[in-house]
């Protein structure tokens, strides 16, 4: 059965966002959601040297799906333009379109690669990385971040539909504060629990 998880990190534009980055993790199976607590990300938001971002069309970080970037942007932005009810997270009015961001895509790809390589499904990386540290390592200078992950879905339409049916994922996708998006899908291997591992990162630049 496909899995979904959502995380949201936000901070005001303070020097290091110390003790102000609230992480909300929602876990669900088949589109449902339940809270599993929160934590605090205290990593300073200082860009690290970056490598060139990976390609996003018809490659291993798109699960070899054609027109991945265009289809994902179209699906997400169509939902944002329409507004949505996100269950316990409330109703969201129409929001501005997101822009594809190579640095967030790099962060998303690194996390999907990690989940495949180490056969796990969680927002915390195998080395303890968080959404905030991954985005910063990719060179994205941020004031707020959100992340949806999923596993097992075989198309952009399926994964976006699943996220929209789960309150926390829907709220991340509809958050009007976010301006940028980066998404990766990495195929699992015979030793993985799932056939695909998706990471969708949202951000607001500082």
Image: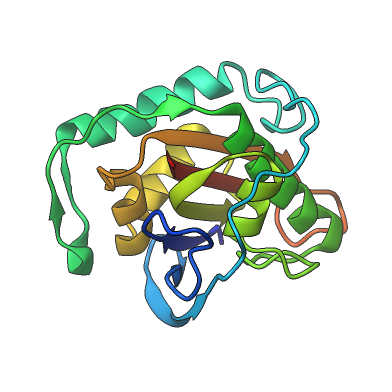
Q: Position of residue 9 (x, y in %)?
A: 45, 61
Q: Is residue 58 left or right of residue 76?
A: right
Q: Nearer the viewer, residue 130 or 198?
A: 130
Q: Is residue 3 left or right of residue 79?
A: right
Q: Nearer the viewer, residue 59 or 145?
A: 145
x 37%, y 29%: residue:
98
Q: Is residue 38 above or below residue 6?
A: below
Q: Position of residue 116 (x, y in %)?
A: 79, 53
Q: Position of residue 74 (x, y in %)?
A: 38, 23
- Position of the C terminus, as image quadrant, is top left
x 40%, y 51%: residue:
163
Is residue 35 visible in this depiction of the protein?
A: yes
Q: Is residue 60 above or below residue 147?
A: above
Q: Is residue 48 above or below residue 167?
A: above
- Position of the N terminus, as image quadrant, is bottom right
Q: Position of residue 183 (x, y in %)?
A: 56, 37
Q: Residue furthest front?
A: 15
Q: Is residue 5 left or right of residue 50?
A: left
């Amino acid at each position: 059965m496909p899995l979904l998880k959502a995380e949201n990190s936000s901070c005001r534009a303070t020097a290091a966002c110390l003790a102000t980055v609230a992480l909300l993790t929602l876990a669900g199976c088949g589109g449902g959601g339940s809270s599993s607590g929160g934590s605090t990300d205290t990593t300073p938001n200082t860009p690290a040297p970056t490598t060139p971002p990976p390609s996003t069309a018809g490659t291993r970080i798109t699960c070899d799906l054609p027109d991945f970037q265009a289809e994902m942007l179209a699906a997400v932005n169509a939902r944002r333009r329409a507004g949505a009810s996100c269950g316990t997270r409330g109703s969201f009015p129409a929001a501005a379109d997101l822009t594809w961001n190579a640095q967030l895509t790099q962060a998303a790809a690194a996390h999907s690669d990690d989940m495949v390589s180490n056969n796990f499904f969680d927002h915390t990386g195998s080395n303890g990385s968080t959404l905030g540290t991954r985005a910063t390592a990719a060179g994205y200078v941020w004031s707020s971040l959100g992340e949806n992950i999923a596993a097992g879905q075989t198309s952009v339409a399926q994964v976006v539909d699943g996220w929209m049916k789960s309150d926390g994922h829907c709220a991340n996708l509809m958050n009007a504060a976010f301006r940028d998006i980066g998404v990766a899908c990495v195929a699992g291997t015979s030793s993985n629990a799932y056939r695909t591992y998706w990471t969708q990162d949202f951000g607001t630049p500082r």
